[in-house]
Image (tube, rainbow, N blue to C red):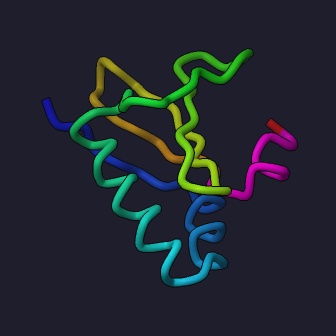
Amino acid sequence: MKFHIYLTRRAEKDLKRISPEVRKRIEEKIRELALDPLPRGVAKLAGLKDAYRVRIGDYRILYRVYWEEKIVVVFRIALRKGAYKAL
C-alpha cells in the first residue's frame, strides 16, 4: 500500500533553506511516509482534517493524507517555533 508523495511550493522552498545534513534526514523521513503515512511518533493537527505532523529533531514536517487517493501532501517543513503559524 504505497502512497504518492507531493510537496507544495511552500514545502519545496522550506526544504531548500535547510542545511544539507538536516535536509537529507528530512527527505528520508518524507520517503518513509510513502510506505507508512502514520509512523510512530506522529501527531494529528487539531482543526485540520487528516493533517499530521512528524518530528525530525527541531524541525516539523506538516502533511495531509488523502486516504482514498493514496496521496500524502507535505505542505510545510519548518522549525518548531514557526511551523504552526498561519495554518
Q: Quadrant of residue 78?
A: bottom right
Q: Is residue 26 left or right of residue 82?
A: left
Please report the residue visible at 34 percent of the width from the left and 35 percent of the height from the top.
71
- The magenta-colored residue range is 77-86
Task: Point out the image quarter for the N terminus.
Answer: top left
Decide whether residue 84 is among the magenta residues.
yes
Q: Quadrant of residue 25?
A: bottom left
- Residue 12, x across and y down, in percent: 56, 67
Q: Is residue 40 above or below residue 48?
A: below
* Nearer to the camera, 56 or 13: 56
Q: Is residue 61 left or right of residue 21?
A: right
* Nearer to the camera, 81 or 37: 81
Please report the residue visible at 62 percent of the width from the left and 76 percent of the height from the top.
18
Q: Quadrant of residue 65?
A: top left
Q: Is residue 78 left or right of residue 7?
A: right
- Residue 4, x across and y down, in percent: 27, 44
Task: Point out the image quarter for the C terminus.
Answer: top right
Please report the residue visible at 35 percent of the width from the left and 32 percent of the height from the top.
37
